[in-house]
Amino acid sequence: MCGAHISWEKTGGAQLASVPKPGSLPPVRNEGVMIQRPVPWNYYQNVVTSSYSYVWWDWERWEKEIDWMALQGVNLPLAFTGQESIWQKVFAEFNITKGDLNDFFGGPAFLAWARMGNLHRWGGPLTENWLSEQLKLQKQILSRMVELGMTPVLPSFSGNVPAALKEIFPKANISRLGDWNTVDGDTRWCCTYLLDPSDPLFIEIGEAFIKQQIKEYGDITDIYSCDTFNENTPPTSDPAYISSLGSAVYTTMSKVNKDAVWLMQGWLFYTDSSFWQPPQMKALLHSVPFGKMIVLDLFADVKPIWKSSSQFYNTPYIWCMLHNFGGNIEMYGVLDAVASGPIDARTSNNSTMIGVGMCMEGIEQNPVVYELMSEMAFRNDSVQLEEWLTTYSRRRYGKSVNEVESAWKILHRTIYNCTDGIANHNKDYIVKFPDWDPSVNNQLEIIQRRKFTGVQQKMRFFIHETMSFLPQPHLWYNNRDSITALKLFIDAGNELAEIPTYRYDLVDLTRQSLSKLANEVYLSAINAFQDKDAKALSFHSLKFLQLIKDIDKLLASDDNFLLGTWLESAKKLSSNADEKKQYEWNARTQVTMWYDNTKSVQSKLHDYGNKFWSGLLEAYYLPRASMYFTRLSKSLEENEEFKLEEWRKEWIAYSNKWQKSVEIYPLKAQGDALAIAKELYHKYFI
């Protein structure tokens, strides 16, 4: 009614200028306003959001997040902070020492994957300062969530145990899992241990964990999260065995809390669908009393499982939007699916849907998507998006401006209307530079490439069909349309330049348009190399490198796109020089190499957590691309093969050095965002 808008601070923050002064507020009709939720739950978070987004947060930042959650109607949030301190106390009861746990816990930026049993030790060990401060923080988080009427979802025991437990309990049914994404199966980091749910020790440990949480936090929830089978296939597909495993997992909760409800991600039914056939799904879903399990249909915005599983075989579920991977920064959305999908699910025959949820891997991006998704918990009917976006634009910027309202109509049918069913993980060449030798391509592919050069609407098909071994940037719209929208945003600058929400959107749209252009420029450089055209290679490679520099300059003009903020928030949590060094390494590594590497083989997860941040482009992505193009040019000049392995050694050594380095990056924006956006628009698009 007041035209206000509140998004994350890093996506522009609050627009409250449109709210009338006290005494001038619009009158509420006599009977008041009541909007009844059609479903009881509005779920929030992904098990990895704690690492990609929350890892370096203090209470001041958490307090703002919980306020934001309340304003969005969230009432079922994950609450995973500080659980390592609980585990330390629980495992001590089973004679596991602090030294044993140094090998078990991951470092701060990698805790999510250590909790899931994907890795151990990587980035660690955890200090006593970290453990105690995170537990203290968790108590503040839980207290505020409960105060604001939320039901926190606490963790439970999934079977992931320290290696030392196998020595202490040699008869326990403990198996070693396979490798998860290390370069060469390095057991320092990989191949964790899983206690079989059928073993009596499983229930004993799980029960102790729930009891310890209640002792620390009080009796604040009945809902517990557990994902024993997430990216971890059971040893047999026998439905009876799977049912017994599910029953054991639930027993660890219900023996302590008779009203316990098991909340489980449905991700496994999508990623391992060949194993989880109807008999196996039913066995797991029906292994607990009806109503005591809730399934998150995690990827319902793109790949809904409810449609193909008879509504999870009558098990209550939450319709979730996944949307983001790795905390990447890319404008992307499926607004039409979000505006209608939850309604279709709730009103379908024999629906078992009981809520909606936002399950992004990383937050603080694409605020329009999360504004709409959070509303869907309160809507009885599908949203008329064109009308909704006009209202959204007026609320977000505090006034009606024709140019941006027209721009949002374009963005709706292009960037925010992806319908190809591809999970959107940013693989633009700037932030995920290809690791390949372009000289191996054949002439037929070169001919095909020339056929499509410059034809933007064909780009996604060209990349998919002719360069299958080259990373494939996702392009689901015509970049010319986004450039048209960008021009409209720039034209609105005279009225909106001082408004932070506008400035964020302007910078983000300019960045996106330039990044997609850079993908084309990269391919032109490769085409020139394969044609042995040294002059053209030089032209296009220099243009690619200049685009990185210009995007870095653009991002530097807004506080919300700075590498320095991420690094300083990590260092701020340290209590001594060693912690400071460790935390900064964790922060730098997560957004670059991510996991282990050798001298000539990069991490399998390199650039998974890539970010368009000023400082990261100039200091990391730019040198890597420069090294590559320098070697390509040398290959042509000296008429010799491209030395791919030598380039790998060079850039991997550079990456590892950068991960350990301690340069200071700016914490405040520099430059005029509107002026820079105008400059780059004229430089590249006119």
Image: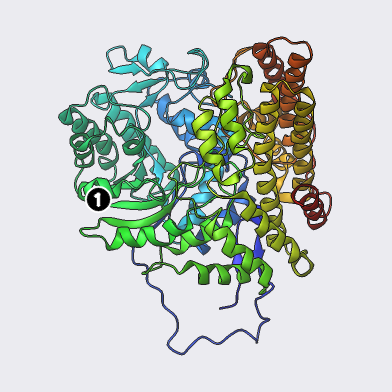
Q: Position of residue 90 (x, y in %)?
A: 41, 30
Q: Quadrant of residue 486?
A: bottom right
Q: Badge 1, how many Cα within 10 Å: few under 14, some, many 20+?
A: many
Q: Tell me if I can see residue 276 in this picture.
A: yes
Residue placed under numbered mark 1 in the picture = 311
Q: In the rendered view, does 18 fall on the left or right side of 103?
A: right
As drawn, 515 above or below 606: below
Residue 217 or 378: which is nearer the viewer?
378
Q: Coloured how? A: rainbow
Residue 488 or 657: which is nearer the viewer?
488
SS state under label 1: helix
As drawn, 154 above or below 32: above
As drawn, 52 above or below 43: above
Seen at 27% across and 52% down, the residue is: 316
Q: Tell me if I can see residue 40 in this picture.
A: no
Which residue is outermost to the left? Answer: 240
Seen at 48% across and 47% down, the residue is: 323
Q: Where is residue 429 in the image (x, y as percent from the top left)?
A: 64, 33
Residue 100 or 623: which is nearer the viewer?
623
Q: In the rendered view, does 498 fall on the left or right side of 350?
A: right
Amino acid on which the number 1 mark rests in the picture: Gln
Q: Position of residue 137 (x, y in %)?
A: 56, 44
Q: Where is residue 291 in the image (x, y as percent from the top left)?
A: 23, 51
Residue 236 or 119: which is nearer the viewer?
236
Report the number of numbered marks: 1
Q: In the rendered view, does 414 fall on the left or right side of 562?
A: left
Can you say which quadrant of the picture contains the N terminus?
bottom right
